[in-house]
Amino acid sequence: MTLFHGRVSTVDEVGRTKARVTVANDLVLLDVDMPRNIFAPTCLHTLYDLGCGIPAGAFSTNDVAGAGSSATLINFAGAQAAHAQGSLIFSMGVNAGLRVAIKSVVAGVSATLMYPLPNAPAPGDALTAFWGCDHTMGTCQAKFDNLANFRAFPFVPPPQMAV
């Protein structure tokens, strides 16, 4: 049996045998302030999405896991500084189909992962490493030459506290 329909806006009184609540119509959801545009100094696009417009394949490296790789450190000769903050996908082995975030890179040597893999890769497991982005205007211009799709407001002054 439906006793009321709507959203509980406030609980006025609660006792052992009764409770008094105020119920509001579903139209109260229209009162939520939600800006159409967010003004932030960093880009709002996700790297390689439709808004960004960069094809992921153009900024990736295919390689294999090297000897000595662990769940948090992947050795591969194709590691580049550009892979920092990017991602890595394994296409074979115990981690096949798994995508992980790259924390940092030692160029030509290895990539350190943000979070450990469930299993350490075996030497020779195929992987694809994708370039990363810090969502700043400088990176968008210098690394990807994609300033036309940069969706941020880097010159908005920071919020100030009134004293």
Image: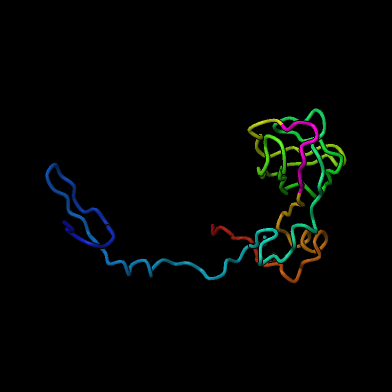
Work out whether 57 lies above or below 118: below
Q: Quadrant of residue 95?
A: top right
Rendered location of residue 135, percent (x, y): 70, 58
Query: Image point 56% across, 57% down: which residue?
Result: 161
Highlighted magenta segment, given as a residue range? 121-129
Residue 81 part of the magenta segment? no
- Which residue is at the front of the view, 18 or 161? 18
User: Residue 125 lies in magenta, yes or no?
Assistant: yes
Q: Residue at x 71, y 38 (%)?
A: 113
92 lies above or below 162: above
Q: Residue furthest top?
A: 68
Q: Give left or right: position of 153 versus 128.
A: left
| Image location of residue 29, percent across then percent down | 37, 66
Where is residue 151? Give x, y as percent.
67, 67
Q: Is residue 42 above or below residue 100?
A: below
Determine the residue located farthest toward the left in the rendered image: 17
Instruction: Give residue 163's quadrant in the image.
Output: bottom right
The residue sitting at 13% across, 48% down in the picture is: 18
Give the residue displayed 79% in from the left and 32% down from the top.
123
Q: Who is closer to the viewer here, 27 or 87?
A: 87
Q: Which quadrant of the view contains residue 26?
A: bottom left
Q: Position of residue 8 (x, y in %)?
A: 27, 57
